[in-house]
Amino acid sequence: MSLLSADGLVKDFGGLRAIDGLSVSIDEGELVGVMGPNGAGKSTFFNCVSGVIPPDEGTVALNGTDVTGDPPESLAHRGLVRTFQDTRELETMTVRDNVRLAAPDQSGERTLPALLRTDGMRREEAAVRERADELIETFELDHLADEYSSNLSGGQRKLLELARTLMLDPDVLMLDEPFAGVNPTLTREIADRIRDLNADGMTVVIIEHELETLTELVDRLVVLQQGRLLVEGDPETVLEDERVIEAYLGG
Ligand code: ADP
Ligand code: MG
């Protein structure tokens, strides 16, 4: 049984069919790349799978449970978390606060005055602080922890978003163009972190437009074109496929 399976997804935007009967299965522990020319439907596929927009047709199953159209928070509870192509952290907060506040709402009681908090709440908060600091260190953002995130570079924002995502401790991590606008050094950095997470058992699905980084990173490539599955398989075979070459040259 696949960990995540999308079956016959269709998504229309007005007269435009962004996703056209797309079926993709991901096994537990896989590191899968999703590629395809601009407008191929990669982000829409992620949106349908992660509950950001419901598909018009088709189903999404996670761990054998039908989760079609379930909202992102509910999917996050079930272990599936995605990042966005455009980072959306709150610019008026520091890096540290951004990461801490990404933690699942701690019983909604964060605003209680200190004297009214139970020991359990305090312990939970301490654990969140500790985990946030660990992630900030892992992503080498420690020197920026007290900066407002508006002062970060594009690449540093990508790292911040990954750190925020990991506060949710996902089983399945879906990354939409994590390397876009990121310099080569940081790209290698992020790629290494992704590899580590996958080696520790996390299932990872990555959208990427640039082929080079993706090919070195993933076990399997899924290529979309005009909302359909064009080719899938191991990276070497896929990249030599005539249809893929044509899709990319054709734009
Ligand atoms: P990709 O991520 O592969 O570049 P997208 O999934 O973003 O492609 O887009 C697929 C197609 O759907 C494009 O033609 C895009 O313009 C269109 N599209 C995506 N999201 C919307 C939306 N919210 N409203 C209207 N059209 C959209
Ligand atoms: Mg996209």
Image (cartoon, grey):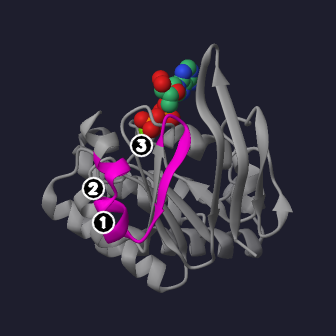
- Quarter of the view holding residue 143: bottom left
Residue ID at (22%, 51%): 182
Residue that numbered label 1 is attached to:
215
Residue that numbered label 2 is attached to:
211
- For marks 1 and 3, the one nearer the N-term is 3
Q: How many marks?
A: 3
Magenta extent: 225-245
Q: Is residue 108 visible?
A: no
Asked if the residue at tag 2 contacts the one at tag 1, i.e. Cβ–Cβ closer than 8 Å, the answer is yes
Pinpoint residue 10: horizontal percent, then vertical percent.
69, 35
Report, in whole angstroms, how far the alpha carbon at label 3 lies from the one at label 2: 34 Å
Placement of the C terminus among the 4 image quadrants: top left
Residue 3 vertical position relative to residue 48 in the rendered view, above or below? below
Report, in whole angstroms, how far the alpha carbon at label 1 lies from the one at label 3: 35 Å
Seen from the viewer's position, the closer of residues 87 and 188 is: 188
Residue ID at (55%, 37%): 227
Considering the numbered disc 2 on the image, is that residue within a helix, a strand or a loop?
A: helix
What amino acid type is highlighted by mark number 3?
Answer: Met
Q: Nearer the viewer, mark 3 or mark 2?
A: 2
* Residue 93's disc number: 3
